[in-house]
């Protein structure tokens, strides 16, 4: 079932499902309402009828206790009833008669009105019935007499007892011969439209239409003005919806055929639909010591606070001066207070009025109390919807204490093929009693990220949340939702000791609140929402991490530690909540204002519930495989975040069976601490008669044979898809036959460290061979080097699956891919180091290399983000200087000279002794010169010559300094720089140009001025 929501303030109609509270479960027993006919205002019996007799037997005779007409059988016979003492107005005409005859009819006339009535057969002449005949209009100026004339009569027309007049207020039709008069209650409309749905003949002919008010005897249509005469005046009369077209014929043009040109412009005339708002302002400190104003939508105030009424109605901008309008203010429906709102500036069409409130009678203030409703009303006289004068209303509530309700909303993550991020589904169930009170803990929830003890949390229904989507927190606290800028802070902590503070904002996202045509539903309901990204980790795991492509962006609210006022590096790093599979996530919110007048802590809990993913993959544990080979390895991977339960590398168990009888219980080890990713590699050995449960940990092999089918099962004890343990199973065939591989040499090592280091050296040697062959163009050799190097690294991963080797392997793989221009693969390799081994010594180099890949692939926006992340995450890295050089060079080539110069100046501040400091100092001057900031360019070139007087660019620095001063119209300084250039570096190329510049007229004049100044000094 659905229902529609509409409002006169919006043309949009919302359709939404019916809510449970809109249904009446057990309707109360009520008495049946009996509908009664309209009250009979006037009844006229035929006793006083005047007969127009053409037939002798036609008469009014007694029949029992009343009189009726008799022998009414000729169409020439008529009857008149006087309606004396009946008030003017619209009435229903009812006839009280009996009829047992044929299909007769009668015409009833009242002044110019005419009603034709087909008589009803009542069954017998003794059965009388009141039958509706039509509508009649009694006017004070008319005679008000009903004249009955038969249209046809066979035997007896009817036995008429009397007539009844019943007043009506609904629509009615009155016929006056060829005139139809439609009467209906008063409506406020801008347009009227006559539609004739059915008629006889070819067309309808209407001579005239009049629309007016009967009570005031006024006519709106036709208008008082003659429409035809309006075309001859000097005023353009328009109505809403008209298109105003201005045309001009240009007789003299420059077109090919020397013909005239018609120029047109068009405007559409319309009215504005006014909007009234209650607003407030936030004042914020802006750059340069200024103050910026932030506008907020206001919903609640405390006594003593100010309400700003804002009306947006461009129709009321009637002059080139500041205009005014009237608004009404009422408190709880009391007598309205009429105030004047003033336009914010000339021709803005926005009007405001400030209203101060007070709890007691105060001069110039509106007296309000807790729980009051302040109604702001503006009468919108011109609009397109609904099209007539309509009050625009906004309500402001005087704040009153409420009990807050908090919860962590359950969530699911849906993987979409081809998408980087999963689709989040938040299960917004009906609110239940989720809040818990614990006054003893109020002091612990102080807005900072303190550890939350799970033993203090009252047992509630725990929400199940997905790991791959942000955690969503919801707070309902109307007394804190005063305006659209209101925020509340909640503390999210885990039983493992991690904690963050989430700043929740007013939001309607992921809610089941009823939709409204005009109101901010979330602000009205006092709903605050905040989101935080979860990361597997303990309390000692860093909570601030760089944002990656796989992490969601645009989260609701802000996450902080309760101490930082501003977000650190927004868009580059994020604060996350570290959780493990055994943690209970505790939500705490301090409800400071309650009806009980005491601070209360509201709480709710949640736990990670993740459906595991089981795959049989290739060597890199990236792509799934569809078949296996005897003699090679089977690579198994399980991702299950809720199985990361400790600060060590955890494990999960899977069951592997084959068709020919092998059965083993296998442990998969977590790739790194708090990764939630469990992997293992096992050699497939040919054996036609396998022995079950004989797996050795030091030499793990799986006995199978050609053509066998291997089945792998993982029992997920905690799954989002089922309340019971869920068995995840995959089957994969073993092919008949395998591929051989010949190694050029091999050596067995007793020392693992020596073995791994040797293989790394071999891989690095292949990489150097690869680069050498690439430089001399030997494509075949370089491909052999590439494959050999990669194979060595894969052997390290397979034979020594210790996580400590992963960074070095990933770095070398990234270098191989980067040299080949395989940017995405290289970036993926470097990201492995940054995401899983952020503290490794190779992490800064990996960040720099990844930025290089972005830059060389043409995506400098991502490259810039990666460079900035390097500077923020590894501020002491020696690579920062190279980063700044690349950034400055990029912006210089992109002709964004201001940023290029700024980066160069920062470089000189931090790395004055760098080997490329001279070039960067010179580049700063070049950037300012190309940006035509000649004074700053000259100062930069002077700074260059002062810092690096012996540099090979010294002569160029002096020349360009002079050139900059000359362009800045400072000929004196320009003259001196040109002279220094030719004196200090006479043999340089720059000195030749300097001598040429000194020959310019303004330089010669400056030479004379310098000479005269010397003579005057002497």
Image (spheres, grey):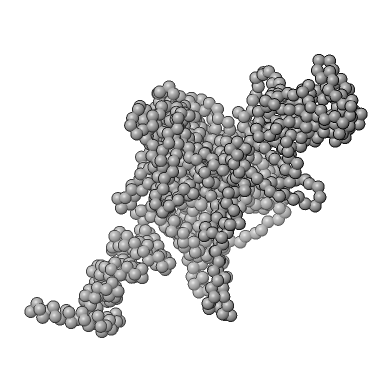
Residue 50 or residue 936, whichever sits in front: 50
Q: Position of residue 205 (x, y in %)?
A: 74, 50
**Which quadrant of the structure image shows residue 138?**
top right
Q: Position of residue 175 (x, y in %)?
A: 74, 39
Asked whether residue 6 appears in the rendered view, the answer is no
**Left or right side of 100 for 262:** left
Asked whether residue 787 appears in the rendered view, the answer is yes
**Left or right side of 576 for 135:** right
Q: Residue at x 88, y 22 (%)?
A: 125
On screen, residue 851 above or below 531 = below
On screen, residue 443 above or below 667 = above
On screen, residue 762 above or below 82 = below
Q: Position of residue 92 (x, y in %)?
A: 72, 30
On screen, residue 972 above or below 889 = below
Q: Position of residue 716 (x, y in %)?
A: 61, 37
Q: Residue at x 38, y 42 (%)?
A: 282
The N terminus appears in which quarter of the rendering?
top right
Residue 152 or residue 678, whichever sits in front: 152
């Amino acid at each position: 079932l659905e229902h529609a929501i509409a409002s006169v303030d919006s043309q949009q109609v919302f359709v939404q499902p019916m809510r449970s509270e809109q249904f009446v479960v057990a309707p109360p027993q009520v008495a049946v309402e009996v509908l009664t006919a309209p009250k009979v205002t006037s009844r006229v019996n035929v006793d006083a009828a005047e007969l127009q007799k053409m037939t002798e037997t036609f008469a009014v005779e007694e029949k029992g206790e009343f009189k009726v007409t008799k022998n009414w059988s000729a169409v020439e016979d008529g009857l008149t009833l006087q309606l004396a003492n009946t008030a003017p107005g619209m009435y229903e005409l009812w006839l009280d008669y009996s009829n047992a005859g044929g299909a007769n009819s009668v015409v009833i006339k009242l002044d110019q009105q005419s009603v034709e009535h087909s008589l009803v057969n009542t069954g017998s002449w003794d059965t009388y019935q009141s039958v509706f005949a039509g509508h009649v209009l009694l006017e004070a100026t008319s005679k008000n007499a009903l004249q009955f004339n038969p249209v046809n009569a066979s035997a007896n027309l009817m036995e008429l007892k009397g007539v009844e007049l019943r007043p009506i207020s609904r629509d009615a039709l009155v016929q006056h011969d060829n005139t139809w008069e439609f009467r209906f209650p008063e409506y406020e409309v801008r347009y009227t439209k006559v539609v004739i749905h059915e008629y006889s003949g070819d067309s309808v002919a209407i001579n005239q239409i009049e629309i007016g008010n009967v009570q005031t005897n006024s006519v709106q249509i036709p208008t008082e003005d003659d429409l035809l005469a309006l075309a001859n005046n000097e005023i353009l009369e328009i109505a809403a919806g008209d298109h105003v077209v201005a045309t001009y014929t240009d007789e003299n043009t420059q077109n090919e055929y020397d013909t005239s040109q018609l120029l047109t412009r068009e405007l559409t005339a319309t009215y504005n639909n006014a909007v009234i708002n209650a607003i407030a302002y936030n004042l914020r400190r802006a750059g340069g010591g200024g103050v910026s104003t932030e506008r907020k939508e206001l919903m609640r105030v405390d006594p003593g606070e100010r309400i700003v009424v804002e009306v947006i109605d461009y129709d009321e901008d009637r002059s080139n001066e500041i205009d005014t309008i009237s608004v009404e203010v009422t408190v709880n429906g009391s007598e309205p207070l009429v105030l004047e709102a003033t336009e914010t500036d000339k021709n803005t069409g926005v009007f405001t009025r400030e209203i101060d409130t007070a709890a007691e009678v105060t001069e110039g203030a509106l007296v309000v109390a807790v729980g009051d409703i302040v109604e702001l009303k503006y009468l919108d006289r011109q609009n397109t919807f609904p099209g007539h004068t309509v009050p625009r209303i906004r309500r402001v509530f005087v704040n009153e204490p409420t009990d807050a309700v908090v919860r962590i909303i359950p969530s699911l993550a849906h993987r979409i093929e081809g998408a980087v991020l999963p689709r989040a589904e938040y299960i917004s169930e009906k609110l239940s009693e989720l809040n818990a009170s614990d006054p003893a803990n109020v002091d612990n929830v102080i807005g900072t990220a303190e550890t939350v003890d799970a033993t203090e949390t009252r047992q509630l229904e725990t929400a199940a949340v997905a790991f791959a989507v942000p955690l969503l927190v919801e707070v309902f606290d109307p007394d804190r939702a005063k305006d659209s800028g209101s925020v509340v802070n909640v503390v999210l902590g885990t039983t493992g000791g991690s904690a963050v503070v989430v700043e929740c904002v007013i939001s309607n996202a992921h809610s089941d609140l009823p939709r409204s045509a005009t109101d901010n539903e979330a602000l009205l309901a006092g709903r605050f929402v905040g989101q935080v990204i979860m990361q597997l980790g303990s309390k000692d795991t860093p909570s601030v991490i760089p944002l990656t492509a796989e992490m969601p962006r645009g989260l609701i609210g802000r996450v902080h530690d309760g101490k930082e006022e501003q977000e650190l590096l927004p868009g580059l790093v994020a604060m996350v909540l570290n959780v493990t599979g055994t943690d209970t996530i505790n939500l705490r919110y301090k409800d400071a204002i309650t009806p009980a007048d005491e601070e209360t802590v509201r709480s709710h809990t949640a736990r990670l519930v993740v459906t595991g993913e089981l795959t049989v993959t290739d060597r890199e544990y990236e792509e799934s495989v569809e078949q296996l080979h005897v003699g090679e390895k089977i690579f198994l991977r399980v991702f299950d975040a809720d199985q990361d339960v400790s600060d060590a590398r955890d494990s999960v168990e899977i069951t592997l069976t084959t068709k020919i009888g092998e059965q083993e219980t296998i442990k998969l080890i977590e790739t790194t601490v708090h990764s939630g990713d469990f992997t293992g590699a096992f050699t497939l050995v040919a054996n036609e008669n396998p022995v079950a449960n004989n797996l050795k940990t030091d030499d793990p092999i799986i006995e199978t044979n050609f053509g066998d089918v291997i089945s792998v099962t993982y029992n997920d004890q905690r799954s989002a898809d089922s309340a019971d343990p869920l068995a995840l199973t995959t089957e994969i065939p073993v092919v008949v036959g395998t591929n051989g591989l010949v190694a050029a040499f091999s050596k067995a090592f007793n020392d693992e460290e020596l073995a791994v280091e040797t293989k790394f050296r071999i891989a690095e040697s292949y990489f150097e061979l690869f680069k050498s062959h690439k430089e001399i163009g030997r494509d075949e050799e370089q491909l052999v080097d590439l494959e050999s190097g990669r194979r060595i690294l894969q052997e390290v991963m397979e034979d020594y699956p210790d996580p400590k080797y992963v960074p070095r392997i990933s770095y070398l793989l990234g270098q191989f891919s980067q040299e080949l221009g395989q940017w995405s693969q290289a970036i993926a390799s470097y990201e492995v180091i940054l995401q899983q081994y952020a503290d490794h010594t190779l992490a800064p180099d990996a960040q720099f290399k990844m930025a290089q890949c972005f830059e060389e692939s043409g995506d400098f926006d991502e490259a810039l983000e990666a460079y900035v992340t390097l500077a923020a995450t590894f501020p002491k890295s020696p690579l920062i200087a190279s980063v700044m050089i690349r950034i400055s060079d990029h912006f210089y080539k992109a002709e964004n000279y201001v940023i290029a110069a700024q980066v160069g100046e920062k470089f000189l501040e931090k790395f004055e002794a760098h080997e490329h400091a001279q070039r960067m100092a010179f580049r700063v001057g070049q950037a300012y010169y190309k940006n035509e900031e000649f004074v700053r360019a000259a100062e930069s070139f002077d700074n260059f010559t002062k810092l690096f007087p012996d540099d090979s660019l010294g002569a160029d620095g002096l020349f360009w300094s002079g050139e900059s001063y000359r362009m800045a119209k400072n000929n004196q300084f320009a003259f001196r720089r040109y002279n220094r250039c030719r004196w200090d570096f006479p043999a340089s190329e720059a000195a030749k140009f300097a001598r040429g510049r000194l020959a310019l007229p303004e330089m010669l004049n400056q030479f004379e001025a310098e000479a005269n100044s010397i003579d005057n000094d002497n």
